Image (cartoon, helix red, strand yellow):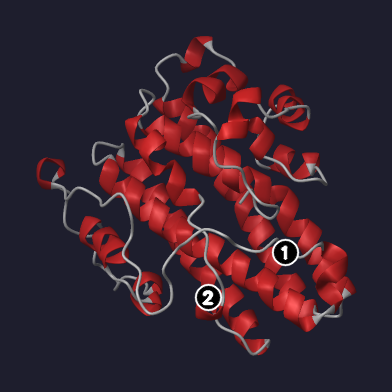
Amino acid sequence: MRDFCLHILEAGDLESKLALPEPGVFDRPPDPENAPRPPMRPKRTGGLEMRGGVEPLPKPHELQAPEARARCLARFAHHELMAVEMFAWAILRWPELPDRIERGLLGVLQDEQRHCRLYLDRLAAHGSKLEDHVLSDYFWKHVAAISDSAAGPAAFFASMGLTFEQGNLDFAPLYRDAFREAGDTTSAAVCEQIHLDEIEHVRFAAGALRELSESAESSTDIELYERAAPFPLSAARAKGRRFDADARRQAGLSEEFIEYVRSARPPQKARSHPRPAPGRLE
C-alpha cells in the first residue's frame, strides 16, 4: 500500500497518478517501522506543475459557453488529482493509523482517481486537457500545517473531509444543475455521482475524526473539529453559497454541527492567509 502511495507522489505524469493497483497488491502485512516518509510536495511534470494565479471559476450562469464549461471541468479534475495525492500523502504520513482507517483512506483515494478520470473524460469531450489550464496548489499550501498539527491525523480528516469535501456537498449539486441547464447532461451526471460519493467521504471523515480524538467521549463534534482543523482552515470554508443541509444529514452530521457550519464566518486573522477562490473551496 505504501509503495503504491509513494509512487503516486513521486511519479510526475498523470497516468501514473491515476493507475489503479493490481489485485492482491496489498496482501502483505504493513511494516510501520520502515514506512517511507512522504514528500511535502508531489512531483509534477509535463505541464501539470502547480502554480498560483488561477483565473476565477466560471459562475453557474456562465456555463452556457463551452469554454466556461471546460475551465470548470479542468478546475474540478485538478481538485480530484490533488485529493488523490493528499490521501496518498496521509497514508504515508501516519503509518500508525488503525487498519480500518488506513483501508478507508485507500478506498477514498481510489474514488478520487475515478472522479478525476470522469472529469478528464468530460474535459476531453470539450476539446481540452488538464495541461491547457493553470493549476493551483491551494490544497498543498495547507500540508505543512496539517503535518505539524498537535492533533495528528485528526487534523487531516478535519481539513480534507470536513472542510474541503464537506464544501463540495454544496458545490457539486450547484454545478450539476448549472451543467444541466446548459444542456450538458453528461457532465451534470458526473457531478451528481461525485456528490453522492462525497456524502460517504464526509461520513468516513467524521467517524475517523471522532475515533482518533482522545477527548471524543466528552466533546461535541464542534469541539473536535475546532481542535483539529489547522488555522486558517475553518467551518467558513466548509460550505458553498447554496447550503445543502440534507446532504450533511445523509453524511451523519449532527444538527448542531450542520448549523455551526451554516452560520460560520471567516476568522479575521485569516485575511492574511491563503484564501480560496470560488469552487470547491479553492
Residue 117's label in the rendered image is: 2
Amino acid on which disc 1 is placed: Glu
Image position of 209 (left or right of 25): right
- Compared to residue 254, the image places residue 187 above or below, namely below
Instruction: Name the residue at 77% across, 58% down.
Output: 173
Residue sitting at 67 percent across and 45 percent down? 167
Residue at the spot x=60%, y=30% of the render?
Answer: 270
Q: Is residue 52 visible?
A: yes
Q: Secondary structure at mark 2?
A: helix
In the rendered view, tell whether residue 195 sits above or below residue 116. above
* Quadrant the N terminus occupies: bottom left
Q: Any mark on residue 154, and which?
A: none
Select label 1 or label 2 by which is in front: 2
Left or right, 22 with respect to 109, comes to: left
Identify the image quadrant of residue 47.
bottom left
Hey, which quadrant is residue 65 in on the image?
bottom right
Residue that badge 1 annotates = 192
Looking at this view, name the residue that lies furthest to the left: 34
> Which amino acid lies under the numbered mark 2 shown in the image of this protein?
Arg
| Residue 199: % across, % down | 64, 48
